[in-house]
Amino acid sequence: MKVYDADHTRNIALVGHSGSGKTTIAEAMLFNAGVINRMGTVEEGNTVSDYHKSEQDRQMSIFTSILHTEWQEHKINIFDTPGYLDFTGEVIAALKVVDTAVFVIDGVTGVQVGTEAAWQFAKDFQTPSMFLINALDKEESSFEARIAEIQERFGRGAAVVQVAAGQGTRSIIDVLLMKYITFPVGSREMVVQDIPEKFKERAEKLHNELIESIAENDEGLMELYFEEGTLTEDQMREGLHKSMLKRELFPVFVCSGKHNIGITRFMQFVDKTCPRPSEMPPPPMASGNPIMPESNGVPVAFIFRTMAEEHVGEYSFFRVYHGTIETGMDLENAQTRELERLGQIYSLNGKQRDTVQKIVAGDIGAVVKLRNTHTNNTLRAKGTDYEIQPISFPNPRFVESVVTLKQGEEDKLAQGIHRLHEEDPSLVVIHDADLRQTLLGGQGNMHLDVAKERLLNQFKVAIQFKKPKVGYRETVTVQARAQYRHKKQTGGAGQFADISMLVEPLMGEFIPPADIQPRNVAVIETAWGSKIEFIDAIVGGVIDMRRFFGAIQKGVSERLQTGPLAGYPVGDVRVVIHYGGMHAVDSNENAFKTAAKMCFIQAFNAAKPVLLEPIHEVTVTIPDLFMGDVMGDLNTRRARILGMESVGALQAITALIPQSELYHYSTDLRSITQGRGIHKEQFHSYENMPRNEQEKVIASAEKIKDEE
C-alpha cells in the first residue's frame, strides 16, 4: 500500500443515531473502491465493520470500526461509529481525530437523539460536518420533511446539494453538478446525464439557493456572483470547501446505502471537497508549541483508542499529527516518559490488517502490543515536549455495584475492569472503601452489559450487577457534651481513663464557653472533602495530653469511619477534649482510646445527628413534547429545579437530585421520552436528608446490623 500525505488523505466519521445505516454505507464505500467484491449486511452479520460477536448478536455497532479505501489517488479513512447513546465514548474519540463528520439521517425516522448528541460533540470539536440522508428509495421516506427537520435542528447552514429523483428510482439530482445521476444495480459506476425537463425547474431553484448560500459566506465569491449572476462548478466547490472548514455550511447529500445509490458520488465529494488534514487547525495542546501535519518534522502521534483483539493482542489506534511514524521507531510516551518501540504498523479494515512501513502526518494507523501506552497518550520523539490535549469523556450516567459470582476472583475482576477502563475511559471504576463495594459506571445498561460480556470472554471472570449502596454521611447540628469513665480492674494492672468532650458542627471559628480554654488544634481532612477538628482544651494536667492525645484522637477517628447514627462516615465536626482524669498506674493509651470512642458516641448522639445525602446536578435534554412527563417524573425524585433553557429545538432542564433517586434514571428517561431524552450528571454536594427519608435509611442499617 502506498504512502499518502496530508493533502491526499481524508478522515471522515459516519455518525448518527443507531439504525440510520452507517455500517451499510461504509460497506458500500468499500465495495465501490474495490476493497470487497460483495456487500455484506448487518442482518447476516458479515459486514467488514461489525465483526465482534456482541455486535453481530445485537445487529448494531458497539465499537468504532476503522476502515480505509484507496480512491482516485486519495486514501479515505472511514470511522463507522455506534449510534446508540450508551457508546458515546466511541463517537467522541472518533470526532477528536477526524476532519469531517458525516451525519447519516434515516430518510423515514429522521433526526433522532443519537444524531443530536453527536452534533453537540462535533460542535465542541469544531469538526467540519455534512449530512447524508439515507434510505430515500423507501416509499415512506420524505426528503422535504428531512430537510426541514435538519434546518430546524441544526440551522440554515444545511445546504442542499442533492435531491432524490423520486421513490423507487435509482437516480438523484445533483444541483452542484446540475446533473441527473443514475446508479445501475450491482455496478460501482454512476451514469451522469442532463437533468430531465420535468426536474429542471426545481433543480434550477435549488441550484440558485446553493449559489446564494455559498456566496453569502465568501466576500470574493459574492462579488463574482453580483458581476456574473452565477458561479461556476469549481467556484461553488471551492466555496463549499471553505465554508465547511469554518462550519458555516453543511452540505446535504442523499443516498441509499443498502442499494448503493449515491455512494459513489458521495465518495467523489469527500475526495474533491471535504477538508484535508493539511488545512485543519492544529490540535489543542497540553504542552509544546502547536503542530501542523508536516511529514518531515519530528514524529508526534495521539492514541485515541485501544482495543484488545483475540489472537492478536492490544491494538493502539493513532493519528499522526506531525512527522512520520515508522516500524521499529522508539518513541517516548508523553505521560509516562517511558520509551515504546513500535512493532509492525497497520492500516485496518475492521479485523483485516494491511501492513505498512510508515504512516505520515494526517493519516490513521494502528500498532500492536505497546507495553504501557493507552488511550489519550501522546507518543513523541524523545527530547521534545509535545503533548496533545486528551479527550474529555463524559461522566457516567449509569452505575452498578460489581460482585464476582465465585469467591476468590476479586483480583481477576480488578485486573479485568482496569484493562477495560484503559481501553474505554468512559467506563469508570470506583473502589468505595467506606461501603466496601466496587462500582462500574458507564453511559447506560447496554454499555455495562457489554463490559460484563468482555470480562467473561477476555478475563474469564463472571460477575453480577447489584444496586449500589449510597454513600451517605453523618454529622451533628447542635453543640452537646458528654463524659465517660473507662475503668477496668481484673487483678494486676487495670485500665482507667476519664474524658469530658464537647461536640459541635464545624462552622466558623470555635467560640469557647467560659469553662473551656483551647490550647492546641489538629485538623483532619476526610476523603470526601469534609474536615474534623480536634481541640485540646485540657488545663491543669488532669490528662497528660503529650502522652495520650494521639490515643484519644485515634479512638474518635475509628468511630468516624462508621458513624453512630447508621454506620456511615462522619464529617464537619469539632471535637473538644476539655476535662478528664487519669491514674498514675492504670492509665494507658488503650484505656484513653476506648474512653474517647465511647465518649464521642454519647456526645454525637446528644448533638442531634443527621444523615447527609449526596446530591447530583443533573441536566436533562429532551424534546419539548415530553416536558410535562419529565417534569412530573423529576418531582417524584425529590428534584429541585434550577432552571430551564432552549437548546436548539430541545429543552434542557437543570436540577439538583439526590443520588438515591437516580438509580437507572437513564433507562427510565429513555422510556419516558421514547428514546429521545438524554441526561448528564455530576456530584454537587451533601445535604441534610428529610426526616422521613433518614428514618428509612437508619432502619435499613439497623436491620442489616441485626442480620449480621
Image (cartoon, rainbow, N blue to C red):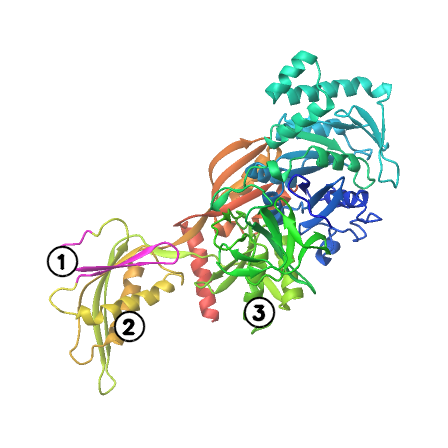
Instruction: Describe the element under mark 1 as helix, strand or loop.
Output: loop
In this view of the protein, which residue sits in the foreground, 396 or 382?
382
- The residue identified by callout 3 is 412
Residue 536 part of the magenta segment: yes
Instruction: Describe the element under mark 3 as helix, strand or loop.
Output: helix
Residue 320 visible within the image: yes
- Residue 594 numbered tag: 2
Residue at x-position 82% and y-position 47%: 39
Query: Up-down: is 567 above or below 24?
Result: below
Q: Are marks 3 and 1 in contact (CB under 8 Å)?
A: no
Query: Up-down: is 159 above or below 577?
Result: above
Residue 493, horizontal then vertical, whole percent: 22, 84
In this view of the protein, which residue sits in the foreground, 50 or 213?
213
Query: Up-down: is 582 above or below 315?
Result: below
- As measured in the structure, the alpha-carbon distance from the residue carrying label 3 to the one carrying label 1 is 58 Å
Name the side, left or right, on which 393 lies relative to 481.
right
Q: Rate crowding at label 2 as few (under 14), some (14 to 19) or many (20 or more) other CA atoms within 10 Å.
A: many
Which of the two discs, 3 and 1, labels the residue nearer the N terminus?
3
Name the side, left or right, on which 661 lies relative to 178.
left
Residue at x-position 65% and y-position 65%: 458
The amino acid marked with disc number 1 is Asp
- The residue identified by callout 1 is 515
Residue 196, horizontal then vertical, whole percent: 86, 21
Task: Please give the range of residues in magenta.
Answer: 511-537
